[in-house]
Image: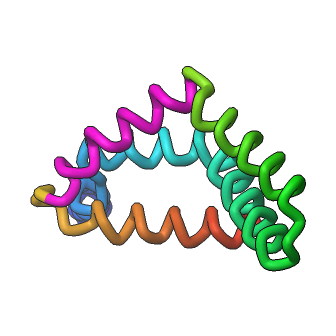
Amino acid sequence: MRPLVFVLGMFVALQLLALSPAAEEFMAISKELEPVHCHKRKLRREIALAEAERRDADATAARARFARLDKDPKTAKLEKRLAELEPLLKRSSDPEDLPAISRQRTEAFYRCE
């Protein structure tokens, strides 16, 4: 009897830790876009450094590479879906959604460095 109660208790606990479908989709898309976001972050730094050092040609080239990333149809489609999911997550009744997304973003930030 005790093992059954333990298993049922674990099942209920796992259900409580589950994320909403919107949060799961948001996290999956974010994971897929992580290399692009990392590259954009590096380009922003490169642009800022080039501007500070008054290397206009380098800054212009970096801006052009940044623009190409934004124009990629697959990236644009995924970014648009993230923008659609964001309001849903802000109104989410699941208390674990936002902390889980925040944790994922923090981990992605440090993986990029």
Q: Which of 30 and 58 is in front in this view?
A: 58
Q: Which of 69 and 6 is in front in this view?
A: 69
Q: Residue at x 36, y 34 (%)?
A: 81
Quadrant containing the C terminus is bottom right
Toward which corner of the image does residue 100 lie, by quadrant?
bottom left
Taking 63 as reference, is 5 above or below it? below
Colour scheme in use = rainbow
User: Is residue 10 on the magenta stretch?
Assistant: no
- Determine whether, in the image, residue 78 is placed left or right of residue 62: left
Q: Position of residue 66 (x, y in %)?
A: 69, 45
Q: Give the range drawn in magenta.
A: 74-90
Q: Where is residue 44 in the image (x, y as percent from the top left)?
A: 69, 62
Quadrant containing the N terminus is bottom left
Q: Nearer the viewer, residue 47 or 23?
A: 47
Which residue extends farthest top? 73
- Determine whether, in the image, residue 1 is placed left or right of residue 98: left
Residue 113 in view (yes/no)? no
Taking 11 as reference, is 96 above or below it? below
Residue 65 in view (yes/no)? yes
Q: Is the magenta stretch mostly helix, strand or loop?
A: helix
Tally the numbered discs.
Answer: 0
Q: Where is residue 93 in the image (x, y as percent from the top left)?
A: 10, 59
Q: Where is residue 64 in the image (x, y as percent from the top left)?
A: 74, 41
Q: Residue at x 50, y 30 (%)?
A: 76
Q: Which residue is drawn at 32% across and 43% down?
A: 83
Q: Which residue is drawn at 62% across and 26% down?
A: 72
